[in-house]
Amino acid sequence: MKLIKLFINFITIFFCLFFSKILLAEDVYFQEGKKLFELKKYEDSKFKFEKDIVFNPKNENSYLYLAKIFNKKGKKSLEETNLNTVILLNPKNEEAIYLLADLNIKKSDFSKAKELIDTLETVCEKLCSSKKGLLEKLESLSKQ
């Protein structure tokens, strides 16, 4: 009986340690990716964000940084896919809405851009002043 209790305690401790390392790894990959992104090491940071998503598929920030990386590389469709994922995970993510609106302006999808700018207006807290710039860009390009 004592041997069974000892074995159960050992298994419990093992699983607790194992899962705590996994939880710590999730945040570590994102933080490493962010540091590499700031150092403009986009390929290395992309790998870290993708690794973070494996552990935490609902981390909107990793998708947002992937979108920024794809923007730098000129891969607009991958940028758009990641921005849409961010908005799917968090419909009130201002930065993703802003970046997606800007991307749609560049793609000449003015109705979608206007819709996103209207959404930004309802959720903005930090990027409210940036909305004006998007509207000006939208108006000037839609008149051409």
Image: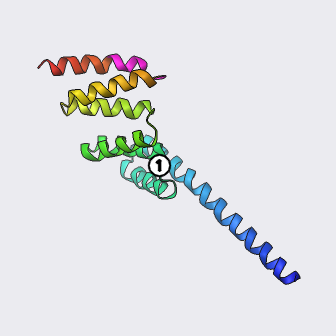
Residue span colored magenta: 125-132
Is residue 75 among the parts visible in the rendering?
no
Q: Is residue 95 above or below residue 20?
A: above
Q: Position of residue 108 (x, y in %)?
A: 18, 30
Q: Position of residue 62 (x, y in %)?
A: 45, 46
18 is within the stretch colored magenta: no
Residue under the image location 45 percent in, 25 percent down: 123
Q: Position of residue 34 (x, y in %)?
A: 48, 44
Q: Tag 1's secondary structure?
A: helix
Residue named by callout 1: 33
Residue under the image location 38 percent in, 26 percent down: 119
Residue under the image location 21 percent in, 17 percent down: 139
Q: Amino acid at mark 1?
A: Gly
Taken as a whole, is the magenta stretch helix, strand or loop?
helix
Q: Is residue 102 left or right of residue 60?
A: left
The image quarter containing residue 80 is top left
Residue under the image location 19 percent in, 34 percent down: 107
Q: Position of residue 87 (x, y in %)?
A: 40, 39
